[in-house]
């Protein structure tokens, strides 16, 4: 008899991936520490994967994890048997198991593990003198339907499965809708709750991004009746029209297919009996709560215009509503907050592999991994952190013999440290290697035409170190499979800035380099300083504002026509915000506010016409072509209903 296990596929994929991730981390610890507790942990993780895979019917995953379990057991019994070759074999098996689990979760054909199973078996025979035991696997199916009875004899036709009714749904979002992406995504979620959704057009990612040509969304839904679909769509606002038609089922084949059925490709199908929540759902919840915050701000503004008799109770109700919505927003944010360890736990394995390729010896120290950030930020940080780590080991650290000659220890050291700084998180990656030569960086950039001779002469060391983020600039003496092509650091800087952070570099020749990533806790809601320029209003992120001072532009010192504002013992360049944004206005005379902020070139002062106040803003992404305009980070809507741009200070053309 065949057992249907498809409803457990999502749970198997997530839990097996976690066990294999921990197994990989334990392998790195085993090479470094080699204690009994690490080996016991490895054995438990391999044993868990074997048991789950055997229950799900994944024979090769179960067999390979069983062989890994046997090999780890031999290392536990005979610690002296552990060698670099066995470590490499275990690492390769773990990577292969992770690839097979991913394929199983996606319903794709997994890569063959026969070669690895044979290699581990040969090693086990050499260690024990006996062949490893066979792996028992439960006979299952992942058809996504209830278990089917055994097929009848060929003379009798096999009864076809009773298929649920399927309906074609065509929905058009109203052209006046301000948030078409939210409405379309809500349509998809409502119908997914009724049954399997097929042939969704546009895709879920396009719906979330608001890419909906002509406001039209189409799909097919398996559910009990058209009335259920109409009832679900009735609660979704801003729908111009909905069309629901029955799709006639195709005739079933006379002979059942011999190959096992594939995992159902239903859009929006959720794994059953699991407490895990998809990040897409959290994104939707956060977006919906953001809309509620904007709506309550709008209600408060509107309530100011009602008669005095009704205004106090109305304002009290609006304030109570805002408190509830704000609390709901904090709860959603707390669910989205994820420890930095989600990405730092992968760094020791990466450091081990890179050091082994480049014949380096390195100790990696990670601190502050318990600090939490928005999951959306962490998703964007995984590749940048890995690239910086790769540069630290490949470019930063010297070869062991060179380090000994310089009086350093043969083993290099890379530290990844995270800490809170008010409403920001600082992540620092520092090595004790050769450091970066500012003069050499300027010479290479000058040779390649990236800067002028005049710019090189006046460039500070900090600005010179940031040249390594220029596309195509690399000072590596050789190109390897690890780095040295002059690509990557520009992508790192861009990724950090895309989530509202900044990248700083500090280096000392012969002592090492430190990369500092200053990151916001979340990208959804930020505190902004509202400033006025002419008739326009803009928002400046409070996190980047250092101070606000008043000064008369006519009495400021000047250098090459650039006004200089004295502040905190230094002279800061002054840039009128109206001129930067090319706003035609009649500049007021006399004393004006100057907002001091951190820009790429260091602290600067932005001259504005007026300070309007501080507000908590729900940041909305910009659509094309505004997303290509430098200096714009997003848009928000004030309580008055007025949309304003949030400025991206590091990218302003100052």
Image (cartoon, helix red, strand yellow):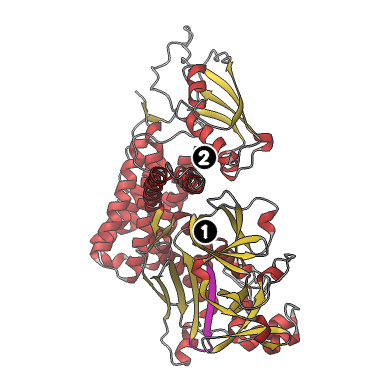
**Residue 255 percent across, percent down from the top left:** 52, 15
**Residue 579 percent across, percent down from the top left:** 71, 70
- Residue range (magenta): 500-511
Quarter-of-image position of residue 92: bottom left
**Residue 180 percent across, percent down from the top left:** 60, 39
Query: What separation in Å lies between label 2 and label 1 (alpha carbons)?
Result: 29 Å
Q: Is residue 145 placed above or below 529 in the rendered structure?
A: above
Residue that mark 1 sits on: 380
The quadrant of the picture occupied by the C terminus is bottom right
Residue 348 visible? The answer is: yes
Residue 64 visible? The answer is: no
Of badges 2 and 1, nearer the viewer stands 1
Looking at the image, which is closer to me, 58 or 19? 19
* Label 2 environment density (alpha carbons within 10 Å; few <14, some 14–19, many ≥20): few
Q: Is residue 301 placed above or below 366 in the rendered structure?
A: above
Along the polypeptide, which appears first: circle 2 or circle 1? Answer: 2
* Label 1 environment density (alpha carbons within 10 Å; few <14, some 14–19, many ≥20): some
Residue placed at 33% from the left, 35% from the top? 273
Q: Disc 2 on helix, strand or loop? A: loop
Q: Can you name the residue that lies furthest to the top here?
A: 155
Residue that mark 2 sits on: 109
**Residue 276 percent across, percent down from the top left:** 37, 43
In the picture provided, is 648 more to the left or to the right than 295?
right
The quadrant of the picture occupied by the N terminus is top left
In the picture provided, is 26 more to the left or to the right than 444?
left
Q: How many numbered marks appear?
A: 2
């Amino acid at each position: 008899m065949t057992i249907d296990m498809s409803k457990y596929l999502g749970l198997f994929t997530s839990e097996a991936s976690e066990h294999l991730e921990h197994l990989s981390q334990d392998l790195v610890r085993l090479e470094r520490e080699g204690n009994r507790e690490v080996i016991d942990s490895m054995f438990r993780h391999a044993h868990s994967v074997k048991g789950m895979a055997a229950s799900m019917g994944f024979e090769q995953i179960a067999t390979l994890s069983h062989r890994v379990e046997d090999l780890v057991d031999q290392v536990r019994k005979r610690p002296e048997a552990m060698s670099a070759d066995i470590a490499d074999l275990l690492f390769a098996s773990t990577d292969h198991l992770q690839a097979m689990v991913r394929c199983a979760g996606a319903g794709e054909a997994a890569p063959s593990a026969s070669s690895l199973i044979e290699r581990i078996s040969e090693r086990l025979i050499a260690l024990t003198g006996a062949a490893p035991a066979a792996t028992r696997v439960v006979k299952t199916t992942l058809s996504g339907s209830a278990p089917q009875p055994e097929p009848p004899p060929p003379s009798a036709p096999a009864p076809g499965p009773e298929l649920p009714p399927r309906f074609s749904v065509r929905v058009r979002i109203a052209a006046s809708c301000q948030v078409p992406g939210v409405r379309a995504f809500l349509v998809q979620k409502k119908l997914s709750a009724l049954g399997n959704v097929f042939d969704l057009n546009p895709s879920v990612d396009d719906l979330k991004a608001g890419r909906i040509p002509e406001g039209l969304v189409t799909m097919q839904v398996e559910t009990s009746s058209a009335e259920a679909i109409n009832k679900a769509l009735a609660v979704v606002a801003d729908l111009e029209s909905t069309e629901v038609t029955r799709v006639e089922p195709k005739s079933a084949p006379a002979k059942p297919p011999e190959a096992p059925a594939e995992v159902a490709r239903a859009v929006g199908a959720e794994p059953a009996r699991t407490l895990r929540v998809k990040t897409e759902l959290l994104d939707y919840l956060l977006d919906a709560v953001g809309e509620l915050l904007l709506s309550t701000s709008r209600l408060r503004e509107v309530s100011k215009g009602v008669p005095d008799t009704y205004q106090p109770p109305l304002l009290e109700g609006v304030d109570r509503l805002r408190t509830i919505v704000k609390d709901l927003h904090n709860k959603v944010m707390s669910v989205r907050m994820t420890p930095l360890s989600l990405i730092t736990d992968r760094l020791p394995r990466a450091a081990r592999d890179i050091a082994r390729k480049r014949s380096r010896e390195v100790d990696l120290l990670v601190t502050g991994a318990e600090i939490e950030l928005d999951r959306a930020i962490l998703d964007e940080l995984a590749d940048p952190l890995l690239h910086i780590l790769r540069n630290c080991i490949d470019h930063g650290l010297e070869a062991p013999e060179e380090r000994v000659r310089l009086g350093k220890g043969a083993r290099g050291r890379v530290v990844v440290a995270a800490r809170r700084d008010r409403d920001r998180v600082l992540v620092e990656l520092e090595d004790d290697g050769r450091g970066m030569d500012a003069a050499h960086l300027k010479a290479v950039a000058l040779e390649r035409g990236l800067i002028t001779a005049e710019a090189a002469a006046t460039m500070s060391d900090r600005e010179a170190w940031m040249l390594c983020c220029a596309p195509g600039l690399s000072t590596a003496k050789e190109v390897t499979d690890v780095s040295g092509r002059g690509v990557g650091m520009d992508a790192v800087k861009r990724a950090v800035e895309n989530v509202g952070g900044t990248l700083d570099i500090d280096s000392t020749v012969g002592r090492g380099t430190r990369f500092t990533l200053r990151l916001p806790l979340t990208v959804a809601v930020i505190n902004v300083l509202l400033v006025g320029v002419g008739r326009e209003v803009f928002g400046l992120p409070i996190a980047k504002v250092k101070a606000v001072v008043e000064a008369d532009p006519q009495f400021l010192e000047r250098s090459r026509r650039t006004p200089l504002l004295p502040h905190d013992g230094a002279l800061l360049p002054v840039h009128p915000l109206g001129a930067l944004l090319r706003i035609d206005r009649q500049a007021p005379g006399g004393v004006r506010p100057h907002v001091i902020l951190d820009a790429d070139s260091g602290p600067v002062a932005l001259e504005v016409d007026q300070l309007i106040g501080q507000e908590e803003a729900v940041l909305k992404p910009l659509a094309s072509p505004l997303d290509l305009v430098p200096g714009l980070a997003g848009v928000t809507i004030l309580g008055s209903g007025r949309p304003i741009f949030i400025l991206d200070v590091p990218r302003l053309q100052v």
